[in-house]
Image (cartoon, rainbow, N blue to C red):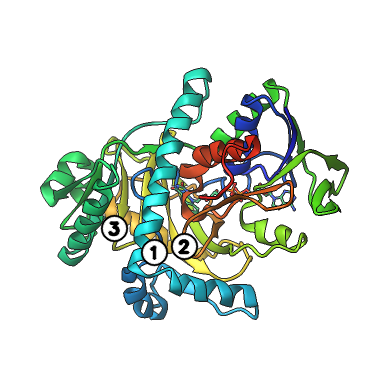
Amino acid sequence: MSRICVIGAGIVGCATAYQLARAGHRVTLVDERSAPGMLTSAANGAQLSYAYVEPFASPATLRALPKLLLSRASPVRFRLRADWRQWAWGARFLMACRKTQVQRATRQLLELARSSRETLDDWMRTEAWQFSFARNGKLVLCPDTATLRRQEAQVRLQASFGSEQSVVGRSECLAIEPALSGSAAPFVGGVWTPGECVADPRLLCGELVRSLRSLGGTTLFGERVEALRRKGSAIAAVRTSASEVSADAFVLAAGPQAARLASTFGLHLPIYPIRGYSLTLGFRGERRPKVSVTHLGQKTVYAPVGGMLRVAGMAEIDGYENTVLQARATTLARSLEELYPGVCNLEPNSPWSGLRPATPTSLPIIRAVPGTNLIINAGHGGLGLTLAAGSAKLVEQLVAGHISSEV
Ligand SMILES: Cc1cc2nc3c(=O)[nH]c(=O)nc-3n(C[C@H](O)[C@H](O)[C@H](O)COP(=O)(O)OP(=O)(O)OC[C@H]3O[C@@H](n4cnc5c(N)ncnc54)[C@H](O)[C@@H]3O)c2cc1C
């Protein structure tokens, strides 16, 4: 049994702390916020997207980039910052758009997603958690035939890695999700993945922390980690705004802030924030979506979760600023009204924004830093809710010395 300090109580840190406590370690979880899951894991798209893991960097993204960056209505925005980390990240992103790299990353992400599904199922067998979990399937809608053809190729690739998905026509889409019948958003067909799930990320963080405490774990909320105190090549303790925490090993799970904290230890992590937005809305009447939907034309995801509809999208590479731009929230509401006209109450509406901790390849960084007692578990981009449980399992194996490499 070791003493382990986990830095960051987003979905990745909470899952890691819980899994380590289950394995018998003495865990301390530290976060600068007053409660778990208050940053990127607060109100994300709510999709456990186990089969839909295609990296953001791809040949298709590269081809679409000029249009995506130049159009005012585009969901993707890039603002050049006087920050070499943004430039280095951008260069590596362009390199990651190669087909062979995309295939390699897809295979690794599917493997991690499979382990995540198994691990979460395992946890749910022993815990009576309430986190609006549902296995309701996901439909990815294609606005035109060219997009559908590309998706067919992706489905074929993923089938060779074991994913169960089918390509469906427009009428099958309507049969799967009747709430689409009034849709004004174009779609010619899509990809149906019946095994996909939804969950409320903040509720799951809360449940993980409750179970962590009942396993004897300690939580320090409202304490900002300010420095990692060295002893030789190892970390002896972390100094927080209120205390000092010593441990045998440290796990850095600080999401979009991981790169900044790692740099105080002399490490460069290729993680850069990509801002996105969400709305969480109630329904007006009986016509309610049952399944998760992603519309590839709008680049927007819709998840029925906890009796509400979570609508999420946008990708802004614009530094660490995280204020909600009202115009972007209005664009999301417009997309919703196009896909599901009259289905939701647009008020009350508190738009949310979060910074995806993105790596150029979309692969998270899960590895022990050689010669130290530091483990990185960060960079989960747009899939942190999906991949948190499997990542936690990998960290447990790293701590146990069963594996030595990364994802
Ligand atoms: C619009 C949007 C939609 C998304 N939709 C989905 C989806 O449908 N499915 C999916 O799987 N993923 C989705 N994601 C991605 C997912 O939200 C992220 O990958 C995930 O939340 C990252 O979790 P994390 O724990 O790494 O980071 P965070 O949740 O940001 O947690 C990091 C924690 O570290 C703490 N911290 C940072 N610095 C310090 C410090 N110095 N001291 C102490 N504490 C510190 C922070 O307070 C925070 O609580 C979406 C993201 C966005 C923005």
In the rendered view, does 138 fall on the left or right side of 105?
Answer: left
Which of the 4 image quarters holds residue 393?
top right
Q: Is residue 375 visible to the viewer in this orientation of the structure?
A: yes
Residue pictured at 21% horizontal, 58% vertical: 153
N-term mark: 2 or 3: 3
Describe the element under mark 3 as helix, strand or loop: helix
Q: Viewed as shown, does residue 364 lie left or right of 285?
A: right
Between tags 3 and 1, which lies in front? 1
Q: Nearer the viewer, mark 2 or mark 3?
A: 2
Badge 3 residue CB within 8 Å of ligand 1: no
Query: Label 3: which residue?
Result: 338
**SS type, badge 1:** helix
> Quadrant of the image for the N terminus?
top right
Q: Residue 191: x, y in percent?
A: 22, 49
Discs 2, 1 touching: Cβ within 8 Å: yes
Q: Amino acid at mark 1?
A: Gln
Along the line of sight, which residue is nearer the eye, 271 or 279?
A: 271
- Residue 87's disc is none
Residue denoted by label 2: 361
Q: At label 2, which amino acid type do we have?
A: Thr
